[in-house]
Amino acid sequence: MSMRARMALMGVAATLMASGALLPLVESPGWLLQAAVLLLVQSGVGAAARRVPLARWMTVGAQVLVSLIVLTLVFAREYAFAGLVPGPQAFRHFADLLQAGTDDVERYAIPAPMSDGIQLMLVGGVLVIGLLVDVLAVTFRSAAPAGLPLLALYSVAAGLSDGSGGWVWFLIAAAGYLMLLLVEGRDRLSQWGRVFAGGPRQQGGVSAPSGAVAPVRTGRRIGAVALGIALVAPLGLPAMDGGLLENAGSGVGAGGDGGGTISAVNPLVSLRDSLNVDEDRTVLSLRTDSDDLSDMYLRIVSLDDFDGSTWRPAKRQIGAVPEDFPDPVGLSPDVERKEVRTRITAVGWYQQDWLPMPYPPSAVDIEGRWRYEPEGMTLVGDHGEDTGGKTYEITSLDVRPTAEQLAQAPEPPSAFKRDYTDLPESLPSVVEETAREITSGANNPYEQAVRLQEYFAVNGGFQYDTEVEVGNGSDAIARFLRDKRGFCVHFSFAMASMARSLDIPARIAVGFAPGTLQADGSVDVGLRDAHAWPELYFEGVGWTRFEPTPTRGTTPSYTQPDLPGTTAPDAPEDPRPSQAEPSDEPSSSPTCSAEDKRLEACAGALPDDPAAAGSSGPPWYQIAGWVLLGLVVVAVPLAPMFWRVRRRAVRLASAQHGPSAAEPPPSTGGAGPGIRLDAPGGAAAGAGQVLAVWQELTDTAWDYGIAPDEALTPRRAAERIVRLGQVDGAAAASVHRVAGAVEQVLFAPEPHPTPGLADDVRRLRVALRSRAGRRTRLRALLAPRSAVRAVWAINDSATALQSRWSERRTTLTRRFTIRRTKPSEQRGG
């Protein structure tokens, strides 16, 4: 393998090693294998272009073009011509994916789900970094600057992951970069000749060879010293808070028990993924002493920051988990409550960062590293902690307010009310107008909240339907109010937004609706029980659950008052098995059908318009394009072999059956420059046949590693082939016989024909093949070195065509000039 090929492979390896730092950012690592394949294609195109060789800018251009094609094939083939050639639609699709990926990065917690946008950002970013590394280290032969894009890749990953495990990925990335430098160093030192590293060491009185060992040892020492400096030096800098190894494993927060913050991540991805499952699977199993299982909602997190299109948790301070939780905010001693104990077991594959538990909790007994967020009374895993396989016990309060207590709730504190009634200016006015119209005549915030719930769940004409056509944006809620179709996210978003427009503090809770009672008395909570519901605040009671989503969950008893001006909404029919009748069947719900999932109708908080149903099949031109692409994928790598087989057949056939118009007289390939084959008639044709056989012989030797030397005579060239190929006997005699025939046609006044030259070439090929290793034989068959003559022939043809065109243009210009000047010359005579 050539040194440049080694550098190219090392560049790919270094890029992939640095890309490993991106693995903790997403849930699935499969994108890295995809990026590795595309990187190899990109690097292979560069290696082929350099071997031709092409100009540097043409090499880079070819790599950029192929990278764009493979990205189109992977991410936008349905928008490209024949699924391969990108056009305006493909570029618009790329822009949409990148925008969606940017939104996903801001929205989702780490590790984020592998959406198409995030996957394009990861794979495309790695390809860009790989191209920069290849251009710098291989095309321009300067490996040192290639560390800058590798450092940029690692820095982006470390910044997004908040430094978690960063020192491990730094060591891996640094090792890849040092290996790249080492390979380049060996290449440069090998060009100097002798390595000046002192005299050879004696081993038992014999000098130990040095060769490339010195650069290897020197590179290891330099790399170890540089890596040590990179890790230790920051410790001595007063402007930095420790070195690269400090806080290496930090998760959420700053570690310890002193506090920290939790980022504004969006747990709605868990809800979205749960509604998209093909098969409802149990995620939690619980046993409780509560006498009302219909109210056993498991709350994961609350969303209190609304930007006009989606809700997310605000950035909050977190701390150590207290032994006894404080009373929930706003709850007065006058409200009836009962203490409930619940034991919950999560299955091993359900790895949720937030801890599902009844609200409000008063004590939690769980092992592991967990942090407490007091505003929402939630627990979040620290240092990568999650719920997978955990069993924990929750002590919570079953708060039982009456309708009268809620109706008589005093005004909440002004600061609290301001924080939880904030709405963006981008929210359409129809949201507040509809809320005012629905609650017209209500006497207090409680009656307003009940009427909002009735509007969505009972008398507003809304339907629970995952086949919605509601898109993202500030007008998403307005569209939902107009179309009156959606699922739990839409109902909870709309009711909470409308409540805030009425100055009622509101937020969104995300978690699980009550599960299904089993025969053994336990309750199974499945993925399809994932749910979102609004919580409204009433002073003296605190955050209170409402249920606006029809056919989901249970209607709270305190929202069925017997007060003037209100109606008592019937509890929506729950299509799941009644909890009074235990069932051995797994939990189920109508949240998202298989067809819904195929259409991705339950995909997000405010999903885009779903794709239309599938058609009868792809159009004929797309099928033809894929077939053509398959042929290209197969034919292009095998093109050198096909060309070489055809070339050999034509040359040897001309030697056996006479001259062929398809095979012009070739160059001597070792006979020396300046020789003209201008013998008359059959002599010229015979010379062309002999020289074709000679060139086939030298190309056969070239395919097996013996490059031709144009400066040698045929006799010397034959001796060189016999010596380097280590052939003897009949094969050696065949080589010399072909060389003698070449000398006859070149130098003899009357050359005599030499029969059996084609068999002589075949005999040499068999001898070289029998002495070559498996790798050399495969190389000679699949990627013969002499196939580069095809590229040379194309270049020569292009040059000749350009020369003929220049001559033709000169002739036409001369004729035009003569015609213009001739009349004036005649008048002058």
Image (cartoon, helix red, strand yellow):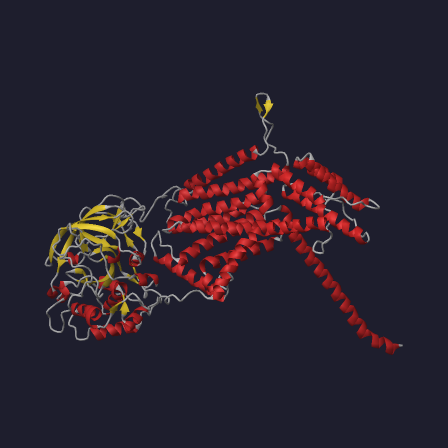
- How many tags in the picture? 0
Which quadrant of the figure contains the N terminus?
A: top right
Residue at 23% in and 51% down: 284
The residue nearer to you, when weighing 527 against 142, is 527
Residue 129 image position (x, y, % from top left): 49, 51
Residue 65: image quadrant is bottom right
Question: Is residue 443 visible in this depiction of the protein?
Answer: yes
Question: Is residue 375 visible in this depiction of the protein?
Answer: no
Residue 346 image position (x, y, % from top left): 24, 48
Residue at 45% in and 53% down: 123
Q: Is residue 717 above or below residue 445?
A: above
Residue 753 image position (x, y, % from top left): 78, 45
Which quadrant of the figure contains the C terminus?
A: bottom right
The residue nearer to you, when weighing 420 against 59, is 59
Tell which residue pokes out farthest to the right in this image: 829
Tell which residue pokes out farthest to the bottom in this image: 827
The residue nearer to you, when weighing 802 against 415, is 802
**Left or right of 192 in this view: 813:** right
Residue at 61% in and 40% down: 769
**Left or right of 74 in this view: 719:** right
Q: Is residue 374 above or below residue 401?
A: above
The residue nearer to you, when weighing 357 against 645, is 645
Residue 481 image position (x, y, % from top left): 28, 71
